[in-house]
Image: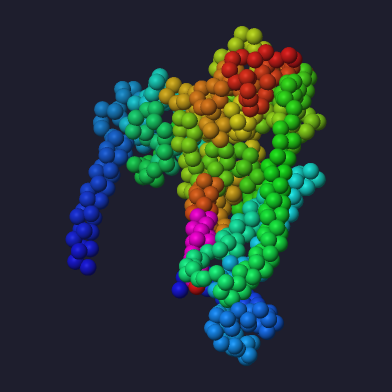
Amino acid sequence: MKRAVRVFVPVALMAAAIGLMAIESSAAPAGEGPAPAPASAASAPGRAPESAGRRLFVQGCSSCHGFEAEGVKGSGPSLVGVGEEAADFYLRTGRMPLDRPGEEPIRGPSPYEPAQVRALVAYVGNLGGPPVPAVHPEDGDLAEGQKLFTENCAGCHQIVGRGGILPGAVVPDLGAADARDVAEAIHVGPYVMPSFNHLSKSEVDDLAAYVEYAHDPEDKGGWGIGHIGPIPEGMVAWLLAGVALLFTIRLIGERTPR
Amino acid sequence: MTPGGVFARVVAILGGLAGLRRRRERQQGELHRISGLAGGEFDAVRSEDEGAPRKNGPARLDEYVPPPELDETSDPRSELIVALLLIAAAVAFAGFVVFYVVSEDTQLLGLCIGLGLVLAGTASALAGKRVVIQEKTTDEYEDYGDREEQIEVEDHLVEAKVGVTRRKLLFSSLAAVGAALGAAAVVPLASLGPRVGEEVYETPWSAGKKVVDETGGPITLDTLSPGEFTTGFPAGESKEEIGSALVLVRLETDELELPADRAGSAPGGYVAYSKICTHAGCAVSLFRYPTFDETQPGPALVCPCHYSTFNPADGGKVLFGPAGRPLPQLPLRAGADGSLEAAGGFYEPIGPSYGGIREGPQESPL
């Protein structure tokens, strides 16, 4: 018991230290975003009083997307016309802001409060573009959703949405994606994902229903083994078969007692 | 005791029971023989040896007959089982040949081969345990002319004769297994078929063939917006043909970098490629399209099997991965109603690469 404590305490301390460092490093670049607006940025001469969203945008987004969201060559695209849909997707899932331009946006904790996200989304929405889509997974047909998912999404996201890799990109796990994320991503086509605007509204509902189901799919016929596909499944099968083979070898090779 | 030990014990007990019964039968037989002989020359020999006449031969001789010691070498029941297992294995292998000819079900083929191997393996394991002599005995030399030894020799001769017959059965069944397994190994050579020849150039696509989606609905210039992709098929043709499935991508027209001789093949930025990867023939089902091409990887079609990556903007050129040649492109044109149709056959042979076709551009005869 004492020995366990002796080992555990330094390990726990080290883990805590590493955790703190990780939190600090990930928070540092983003920390500028939600900080209170410095007076200089807030008041350009001859401008109307700025909305909260505008202020946040100038602080947190403009270095890559430009002061008027017109985009910066080599850093970030124009946000004029992308609409609330894209802004909501990237900000609410914590994909934006990025640490540096060019890296892949990945889901994570957002440095913004929900109210700040709403303000930013409203600001980008005012520049034009589609609104946040309405999605009703409860109206979706699960079977149809699986079919559509197989045809359109499973190539990259894997059949139960556990993600994977692609040359040049990590394909995200959809385990944390809710129906709204799904609908937005289908239209926006984030990062190198193509958009699928040819899918109808009801097809998007079907897909959202399937993705929500796939968070915890029913494992008929055996273990899910992490739902990560045939390679681990094959490995498990081989390990089991290996035990059976060893057992058989022992049976064959054993001396018959006389 | 381990489960293996239990199994071995059970086998040993079964074998022992069989041995016991056989031993008893033979002992009785020997007694008869000896009783019959005892009154004759044997008795005379013995009488000379011992120097005293003995009239109570049979009763006395009983004491001299030792229980046979070397009788564990053959176990007819096990031999029969081994022979039956071998015959069953031969039947299973022969079943492979039969199913190969009459059925297209590869699962039946696998079942036959698997069953045959399991049966043959069981037979050899059992043979190793119960049929082949596994005991070493040492025997002191005794004087020739010893009556007991003569009886034993005679006994061995009888036993050996029986053994030869059984061995014949065993060897014939083993030969049957060998022949059937050999046939099962050779017959699939029939699947090697003729050379591919012109087949790879013959696809359902020709000038004017409409492109439809998986439900048969038309695909028009409005179906996709730039940056989207879908799967296309030839109208009214089988989707199962290797040359049927297309991966259809719409790019911005200014993104296209097609070779000069393919300039007219992409109406509205639509480009069509065979969905069959030129590496190993998987379906090219992954597409990446950047939101912001200045900082993100460019458009690419990716095969999920080995990550061969092709550039849809540049005639399917290989960007990455094991594919040795571009994804074959199908020239498109827009019909009068805006629906997409083929403007000819594929520029290159479709399908996975095979001997001699991997390197260099290929000229299509179409």
Residue at image coords 53%, 64% = B134
Residue A60: where, in percent of width, then height?
34, 33
Q: Position of residue A48 (x, y in %)?
A: 37, 28
| Relative vertical location of residue A132 with respect to residue A176 in this rendering, above or below | above
Which one is nearer the viewer's eye here, B292 or A221? A221
Q: Is residue A254 magenta?
A: yes
Q: What is the count of numbered marks?
A: 0
Q: Residue at x 57, y 72 (%)?
A: B145
Res A245 visible:
yes
- Picture coordinates of residue B366 (x, y %)? 75, 15
| Magenta-colored segment: predominant secondary structure | helix
Q: Is residue A129 above or below residue B311?
A: below
Coordinates of residue B218 in the picture (x, y in percent): 75, 29
Displayed quadrant of residue B352:
top right
User: Residue visible at 75% across and 24% down?
Assistant: B199
Give A241 or B44, whichever is nearer the viewer. Answer: B44
The part of the image, by quadrant, that contains residue A204 is top right
- The residue that appears at 20% across and 64% down in the rendered structure is A3
Image: magenta residue range:
A241-257
Along the line of sight, which residue is nearer the eye, A71 or B32?
B32
Question: Horizontal placement of A194 versus B266: left or right?
Answer: left
Left/right of residue A193 with respect to residue B57 in the rendered view: left
Residue sitting nearer the eye, B300 or A243: A243
Q: Is residue B38 magenta?
A: no
* Quadrant of residue B255 within the rendered picture: top right
Position of B18 relative to B184 (above/below): below
- Identify the image's colour scheme: rainbow, by chain, secondary structure or one colour: rainbow
| B301 to the left or right of B83 | left
Q: Hey, which residue is sitting farthest top in the picture?
A: B260
Q: Quadrant of the N terminus of chain B?
A: bottom left
Q: Is residue B16 visible?
A: no
